[in-house]
Image: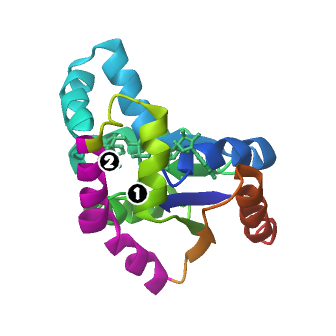
Amino acid sequence: MRVILLGAPGSGKGTQAEALVKRYGMVHISTGDLLRAEAAAGTSLGLQAKAIMEAGGLVSDEIVLGIIEHHLTVVEVETGFLLDGFPRTLPQAEGLDALLGRLGLPLDIVLLLEADYGEVTKRLLARRRADDTEQAIRKRLEVYAAQTVPLIDYYQRKGKLRTIKGVGKVEEISERIYEVLDTLR
Ligand code: AP5
């Protein structure tokens, strides 16, 4: 199964990814987690990314596409993948299409987790990650609206998009997603 999880910061992508990986066994690829690991390891890429992430901006498309290419080329065809937090811009989505075309791994579905900005802000303020300050959250939501929301239309036009109500208990949301993904198995 080859899946993209799309949604605003705090919409629950990482939380739902955990449940989906347990149920379906695909490889979870979170660009946010990978960038935070680079930052924690103190690599030059990580240090560059750290400042951008803490301010709520986006790391460059070239860097992120490079990371994704590195990880997707080792994914087994049968295992599939779950992309979380990627793509986030139109150039990233186009780059991903080209890469998946080269690798012969067509995308099955894009799940949009829908939760309003008030709800996601409340969740992020309660979590307190380094980029969960009021100012960085405001910036992340602005960036999401300007650069990532256009992907909804992009995948809708390709007939790949399914919207999932991302509010309620974590388990209820997982069930909504299973209903959709079980039909793909
Ligand atoms: P990334 O790590 O991808 O962060 P994000 O998209 O801002 O998403 P979050 O991890 O904050 O939220 P989530 O949707 O995963 O929700 P979660 O499950 O954690 O990216 C961070 C930064 O890295 C970016 O800002 C950018 O700088 C850089 N970056 C990453 N990818 C990039 C890319 N492709 N291009 C360029 N730059 C990139 O849940 C959030 C909280 O809510 C948790 O505390 C959780 O417990 C809680 N929660 C979850 N579900 C529920 C629920 N149903 N009810 C109540 N609380 C809930």
- Residue 70 visible in this rendered orientation of the protein: no
- Comparing marks 1 and 2, which lies closer to the viewer? 2
Amino acid beneath label 1: Leu
Magenta stretch? 135-158
Which residue is the site of mark 1?
99
- Check the image and report above or below for 51 versus 163: above
* Image position of 64 (left or right of 7): left
Q: Describe the element under mark 2 as helix, strand or loop.
A: helix
Within 10 Å of the Cα at label 1, are there few (<14), some (14-19), or many (20+) other Cα atoms? some
**Residue 171 showing in the rendered view:** yes
Q: Name the spot of residue 139 as percent of width and height, x first.
A: 23, 51
Q: Position of residue 174 (x, y in %)?
A: 73, 56
Residue under numbered circle 2? 65
Please state which of residues 9 and 81 is positioned toward the viewer in this rendering.
Answer: 9
Image quadrant where residue 172 sits: bottom right
Task: Answer above or below: position of 96 versus 56.
Answer: below
Q: Mark 1–mark 2 contact, CB under 8 Å?
A: yes
- The residue at 51%/64% (across/down) is 115
Q: Is residue 183 left or right of residue 10?
A: right
**Coloring scheme used:** rainbow
Q: CA distance from mark 1 to mark 2?
A: 9 Å
Residue name at image x 59 percent, y 75 percent: 162
Q: Is residue 149 rendered magenta in the image?
A: yes
Name the N-terminal-most of marks 1 and 2.
2
